[in-house]
Image (cartoon, rainbow, N blue to C red):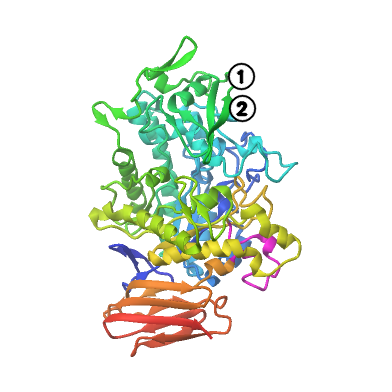
Amino acid sequence: MTGKIDIRGTTFRDAAQRHVILRGVNLGGDTKVPFAPDGRTHIPTDFAEHRDVSFVGRPAPLAEIDGHLARLRHWGFNCLRLLTTWEAVEHAGPGAYDEAYLDYLAEVCRRAGQHGLHTFVDFHQDAWSRMSGGDGAPGWTFEAAGLDFSKFAETGAAHLMQARYDPAVGGRQDSYPVMSWSGNYARPANGIMWSLFFAGADLAPGLKVEGRNVQTYLQDHYFGAMRAVAERVAHLDHVIGFDTLNEPSSGYIGAALSAPVVRYRGPIWSVLDGLALAAGSTRELPVVAPGQGVVGSERFNEAGTSIWLPGRTDPFRDAGVWDIVDGKPVALIENHFQRVGDREIEINRDYMAPFFRAAGDTIRAVRPDWLLFAEVDPFDLIKGHGFPTDAPDRTVNASHWYDISSLVTKRFAPDYLKHVLTGEERHSPSEIEDGYADEMSRIAAAASVLNGGRGSPTLLGECGIQYDMNGAEAYARWAAGERDPSIWHAQSTALTLMYNAIDRGLLSSTQWNYTVSNGNDPMIGDGWNQEDLSIWSVDQATDPDDPDSGGRGIEGFCRPYVRKAQGTIVSQRFDRESGVFEARVDVDPSIQAPTEIYVPKLQYPDGFGSDVTDGAKTEVGDQTFAVLTTAAGLLSIRVERR
């Protein structure tokens, strides 16, 4: 039976007050796009059908879902970050909820519990919406703001795989470089929408929609969609809470109007460039490459097309923030996005904290015991900006961690890593693992201000690796007939170092991701913008009777760990090469439930031996090892291969 989970200090606790490690996956990568018509991003579309789509079948048709959930449990996972999107719920128009989809999603949640998986719901987004290069918000949100998304691709206001990629050619294409989708955050479609969503009342007070400021209008509908889902799953005890919003962006908030916002690659945009392009100006922008600085320039919006709908205008220009003078854009209020009156804007204090409180109020009006899994702008987190101090009580740090270098380059070597942002070099697996652990520890430390300064558990809401790394070498070897696990050596090694670091920090995590429709085709991958991070692929699923069939790099993520501890976990460590797993638990003898360890047959094919502190009682189950003691103090556990 999968029961409730709560928090105590920096730990998750079950009903028996055992320290719980939540180790799970995101289900799934293609949930970002509609099931019908097929919305995977390699398929060209002008999004004309955006109100008439269906997400029923994402993450999997109900006839197939149990097999996938059983596989995840077999691999030792005990948690799901279950994806949905605002678009999936409210695509037909403001207030028009897709009842068939809500029924479907509730049934997926119910079945997850039957398979012993704690579940929290993630309202997912990347780059605001499918129409602006990502996923998340419905198309009508652009109409509410006054933007014409049909003009985004031609002007460069957004970078769209659906418009730039030719599926007849397939493969990698220069017109849509690998992992280029994130550059959309610097472009005007995203900059405008995020600024209005979080700070419209301050930054565009004159923009009203149905009598409400655009910020209030958009957030009211977002939280309405969240409540609609919450009401469908409120009766399920294994549903432990909701994410606030995946990887929210700051938009233009906090930026000077004329200052260029430099990222590690791609065109360099300023707020003024974005607003000018949106109004119909042609822009020529410098382009940077990792480690090379400026390598050229790129022209945008040669035709001088405005992305504002007929009869709609830029609310910032209307407010006198900028204008066109002698044919050139000019900043008139340079600090408009940095100050409100005499107050300097601080996005977490001024906008994220109220947003978190509204999210908490929304879900807890339906079920008061739910946890709130909170995220801030990941780019702000990288800069050292943490969480607001006045987030709601019982908030979890659900920030994300990736080896950003291997993520964006799709390359990994266990003996050398050069960080694409800092230039730092690491020269061995141990140095790479140490770097991972340090980065994760800083993410965990950001939560120290939560819950009245008591801190919170950290659950890495996303972490994972690209399976088509190193030129998709593993896929070529698979296509050539190789079936040995060694074809996934790079992926398994990267995952091993990642989970070693997670264990060192005693962190919970939900790996990105498990995608039912994943294929070994660089055109397809997870079905979204050529990402390919799924731990399972239909192309590897050759034996329906083998639960491991379809898995990729399984040795890297299917590993022993303490699921629940009779007290508080002090440490845990797994050496994949030797098969030795060691854990220490500070026992609370008042807890009358055992420490439970997942011990996978994959790592212990001939069984395992164990060594525990004297006096402890042990019990071996199906891929589990339980230890119960009546003595307070340190419990030591060692598991090794036979």
For the C terminus, the quadrant is bottom right
For the N terminus, the quadrant is bottom left
Q: Position of residue 493 (x, y in %)?
A: 55, 64
Q: Which mark is residue 430?
A: none
> In the figure, is residue 582 to the left or right of 154?
left
Looking at this view, is 499 or 450 the one in front?
499
Q: Are marks 2 and 1 in contact (CB under 8 Å)?
A: yes
Amino acid beneath label 1: Ala
Q: Does 259 appear above or below 85? A: above
Q: Which mark is residue 154?
A: 2
Looking at this view, is 425 or 229 the one in front?
425
Q: Does 560 appear above or below 495? A: below
The residue wearing badge 1 is 303
User: Residue 72 is drawn in which quadrant?
Assistant: bottom right
Amino acid beneath label 2: Glu
User: Residue 434 is drawn in which quadrant?
Assistant: bottom left
Identify the residue shown where x is 64% and y is 55%: 517
Q: Position of residue 171 (x, y in %)?
A: 70, 46
Q: Earlier in the sequence, mark 2 or mark 1?
A: 2
- Toward the top, the furthest residue is 326
Q: Does 161 appear above or below 406? A: above
State whether the magenta stretch is mostly helix, strand or loop.
loop
Of helix, strand and loop, which one carries label 1? loop
Check residue 546 for magenta coloring. yes
Looking at this view, is 421 or 348 the one in front?
421
User: Residue 618 is drawn in which quadrant?
Assistant: bottom left
Q: Which residues are magenta?
A: 534-553
Identify the residue shown where x is 34% and y is 30%: 201
Check residue 347 for magenta coloring. no
